[in-house]
Amino acid sequence: MDKNYHAKNGNALYIINILKKYSDAEHKLSVLEIIKYIEDIYGVKNDRRTIERNIELLKEKLDYDIDISKVGNKNYYYLINNPDIDFEPGEIRAIIDTFSYATFIPKKISQEIIMKCQNMQNIYENKKLKDYQIYSNHIKTNNMEIIKNIEDINNAIYQKKQISFAYYKYDLNPTLKNVQVGKFKVSPYTIIYSIQELYLIALKEEEKKLKKFRLDRMKNIELLEEKVISKVRKADIDAIVKASISMYGGVGEEIEVLCDNALLDNVIEVFGKDIKITKYDANHFKLIMNKDLEGFKYYLLRNIEFIKIIKPQKLKEEIASILKNYLAK
């Protein structure tokens, strides 16, 4: 088939692409404008009847919601977003903000994702992002394998296969680079998001204990032929997620503390709503929850002037010992 055949039969696709990128309710396009855009961008000439016939095809046969307005003796067109498949401008902005500030995504990959998001909306919405700035002092990961890690782990979970990987952490070295601290072989179960980081919840078969691994610290993931052996209940995963604070994922223990009212919003944001809060007096509330003591200890030390421990006693004694040793220095 010759080139002209393909050009003519591409007209419907050209029209959709033009309407998606250059039209909205405030910027409707005439047939002549559509013809000019197609010729300028795709190098294909069209006439009015061809454009109008293809717009009818798109509306009647392919169910595109194209608005037609008549001004004088001219028709003007714009493509109405399909709420089932098209993102709203606010949704696009939310995605862009998420990947701009997410520390678990390298800067280069964030920029590529943002560009893809911008390609999904028209030029008028993109103009609003012309002066977009990122204001953050958080360090983004430099692990370019993060997206591949997500794909490999999802494949392993789907195939019920074990994986192996190298694990990296910061070490005391002048270059401030991650160094490999071990190689692990685990059965993967799910990926969770916690405190701006992605974690793999997995089990080392020989230990029979669920652990959390940060995805941005994992490299060289290999899917093994060995199948996942242990069955983990959803309740077991829920328990480790609910008990964990930040990257700590131990077994939950009952914690009871008095907190200054100023901490209320922060407590709910950090620990979620699966906690018990009751008014204690005009300035304090009582907080009861099941959480990992190791993780809560660090939260407590950051907010020591606002929190009084009621129980467990061992936590109270450990905090007292830490403060005593610190003051003795």
Image (cartoon, helix red, strand yellow):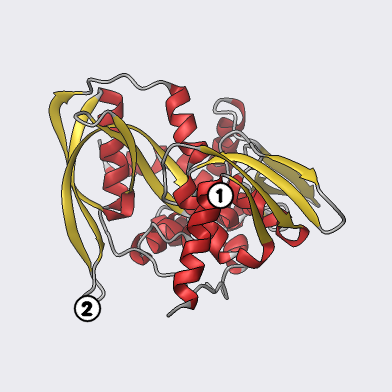
Task: Identify the secondary structure beneath mark 2.
Answer: loop
* Residue that carries the numbered disc 2 in the rendered image: 175
Residue 326 falls left or right of residue 313: left
At mark 1, the secondary structure is helix
* Residue at 57% in and 49% down: 19
Q: Residue furthest left?
A: 225
Nearer to the camera, 175 or 294: 294
> Seen in the image, is 10 located left or right of residue 2?
right
Identify the residue shown where x is 68% and y is 63%.
306
Q: Say few, some or many: other residues with alpha carbon within 10 Å of mark 1 (under 14 / 14 to 19 / 20 or more).
A: some
Q: Give the labeled residue for mark 1.
A: 20
Residues packed near mark 2 inside 10 Å, few (<14), some (14 to 19) or many (20 plus): few
If the image is split into quadrants, where does the C terminus sit?
Answer: bottom left
Q: Is residue 185 visible?
A: yes
| Residue 142 x %, y % | 29, 65
Q: CA distance from mark 1 to mark 2?
A: 48 Å
The structure residue drawn at horizontal position 48% and vertical position 31%, both measured from the top left corner, is 239
User: Which residue sits at x=34%, y=50%?
Assistant: 214
Q: Amino acid at mark 2?
A: Thr
Q: Quick one: which residue is furthest to the right in this view? A: 282
Image quarter (top left, top right, bottom left or bottom right) of the N terminus: top left
